[in-house]
């Protein structure tokens, strides 16, 4: 079953507003057995809305229109839909009275313009709006379900759940989408794909998507199931992919990398302190974003300058003079020094060249060292990270988390 979402509003065609409603609706439609094939954003013009709807009626089983149900002159969704379906619009006196009472409860008289929100397309089921003034509508046109929903997310979600979802589920016939998420760290997108492509290509019924983010690689596997069907092939391909990627898989249940690391620290009974130069707190922010992180995180040092490295992390001045701040020697000294100062089980450090300036042929922009120190050893890892300044800093923090996880394992 195919679904389509049409988001209406000229503001959505500017760089200042995002269409978040489509994300919410896609998940709920998938759960109800509908595959969202098309999402469209259209401005506040009757001809444009009508043109998009005409095409949608030719290819989709359910169409959800969001926005354009307000009282102003640019709220034109009702007009466009009525025009395409060839149905008249009438003013519902019960809705007008309900709107008047709503305004009166707030101490206002209802402006005449708000009567527009009582305009109903003939044959539509009226959908109550418990969180706003504009009612929605559900229509069936030659077997195709068409929903008109308000734009504000709070209003849209409640109306969809109560008024649209029951209709959609009845049309879906018990079809559903099964999903598996596999999150990977310590590998590039191309490395992951080279290992898993021979596996997922052998399962054409399973849709596989590989997404690269700043901190990790995400594999998303999905399979549409008919009523009563079980996802054997989906589970099989997921298990084979996990086996191929091995310890690089840090989560199959949606946990963040920092949450997984926190669990390993808590399980081991060890504590962590960090020293950050180029990332200036990004690593500590990630670690402490996990509730209960005070169980294992003792604190961090932002040692941006050489003076701070010397005073706060006990890095020898002669080491900085000989090797420079971005070096394996200094990375290890930072980890060791912050561990000693904060009396933690583990010291972890980051130093690097984030750019855009400051790089050289020997130490180019993107060069990062992560240092490690515990009761048994001191070591470091080197990584060249591509991207702009913020990307390098964010990826450096995640690289440090990834190495911390690997060492704890």
Image: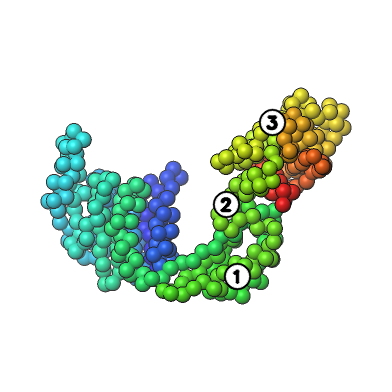
Task: Give the CA distance from mark 3 to mark 1.
Answer: 44 Å
Task: Give the CA distance from mark 2 to mark 1.
Answer: 21 Å
- Mark 2, Cα crowd under 10 Å, few <14 / some 14-19 / many 20+, is few
Residue at disc 2, secondary structure: loop
Q: Quadrant of the N terminus?
A: bottom left
Residue linked to disc 3: 301
**Residue 317 picture location, percent across and down:** 84, 26
**Circles 3, 1 touching at the beta carbon (< 8 Å):** no
Task: Give the CA distance from mark 2 to mark 3.
Answer: 27 Å
99 or 78: nearer the viewer:
99
Residue at disc 3, secondary structure: strand
Q: Height in image: 345 above or below 126?
A: above
**Circles 2, 3 touching at the beta carbon (< 8 Å):** no
- Mark 1, Cα crowd under 10 Å, few <14 / some 14-19 / many 20+, is many
- Left or right of 41? Residue 283 is right
Q: Height in image: 124 above or below 350?
A: below
Say whether disc 3 or disc 1 marks the residue closer to the N-terminus: 1
Say whether disc 2 or disc 1 marks the residue closer to the N-terminus: 1
């Amino acid at each position: 079953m195919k679904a389509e979402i049409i988001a209406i509003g000229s503001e959505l065609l500017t760089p200042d507003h995002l269409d978040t409603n489509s994300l919410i609706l896609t998940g709920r439609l998938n759960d109800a057995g509908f595959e969202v094939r098309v999402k469209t954003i259209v401005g506040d013009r009757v001809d444009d809305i009508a043109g998009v709807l005409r095409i949608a009626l030719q290819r989709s089983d359910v169409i959800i229109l969001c926005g354009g149900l307000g009282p102003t002159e640019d709220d034109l969704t009702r007009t466009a839909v009525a025009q395409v379906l060839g149905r008249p619009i009438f003013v519902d006196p019960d809705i007008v009275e309900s709107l008047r009472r709503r305004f009166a409860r707030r101490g206002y008289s209802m402006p005449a313009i708000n009567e527009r929100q009582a305009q109903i397309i003939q044959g539509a089921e009226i959908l109550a709006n418990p969180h706003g003034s504009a009612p929605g509508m559900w229509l069936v046109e030659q077997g195709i379900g068409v929903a008109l929903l308000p734009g504000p997310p709070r209003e849209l979600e409640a109306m969809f759940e109560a008024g649209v979802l029951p209709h959609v589920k009845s049309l879906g016939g018990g079809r559903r989408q099964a999903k598996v998420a596999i999150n990977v760290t310590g590998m590039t997108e191309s490395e992951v794909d080279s290992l898993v492509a021979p596996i997922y290509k052998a399962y054409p019924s399973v849709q596989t998507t590989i997404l690269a983010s700043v901190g990790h690689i995400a594999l998303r596997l999905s399979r549409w199931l008919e009523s009563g069907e079980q996802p054997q092939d989906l589970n099989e391909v997921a298990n084979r992919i996990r086996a191929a990627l091995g310890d690089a898989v840090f989560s199959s249940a949606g946990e963040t990398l920092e949450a997984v690391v926190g669990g390993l620290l808590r399980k081991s009974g060890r504590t962590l302190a960090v020293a950050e130069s180029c990332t200036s707190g990004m690593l500590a922010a990630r670690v402490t974003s996990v509730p209960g992180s005070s169980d294992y995180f003792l604190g961090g040092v932002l040692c941006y300058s050489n003076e701070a490295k010397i005073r706060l992390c006990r890095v020898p001045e002669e080491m900085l003079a000989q090797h420079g701040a971005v070096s394996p020697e200094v990375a290890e000294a930072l980890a060791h020094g912050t561990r000693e100062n904060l009396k933690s089980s583990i010291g972890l450090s980051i130093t690097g060249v984030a750019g855009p300036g400051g790089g050289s042929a020997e130490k180019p922009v993107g060069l990062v060292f992560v240092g490690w120190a515990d009761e048994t050893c001191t070591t470091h890892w080197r990584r060249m990270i591509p991207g702009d300044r913020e990307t390098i800093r964010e990826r450096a923090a995640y690289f440090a988390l990834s190495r911390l996880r690997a060492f704890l394992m």
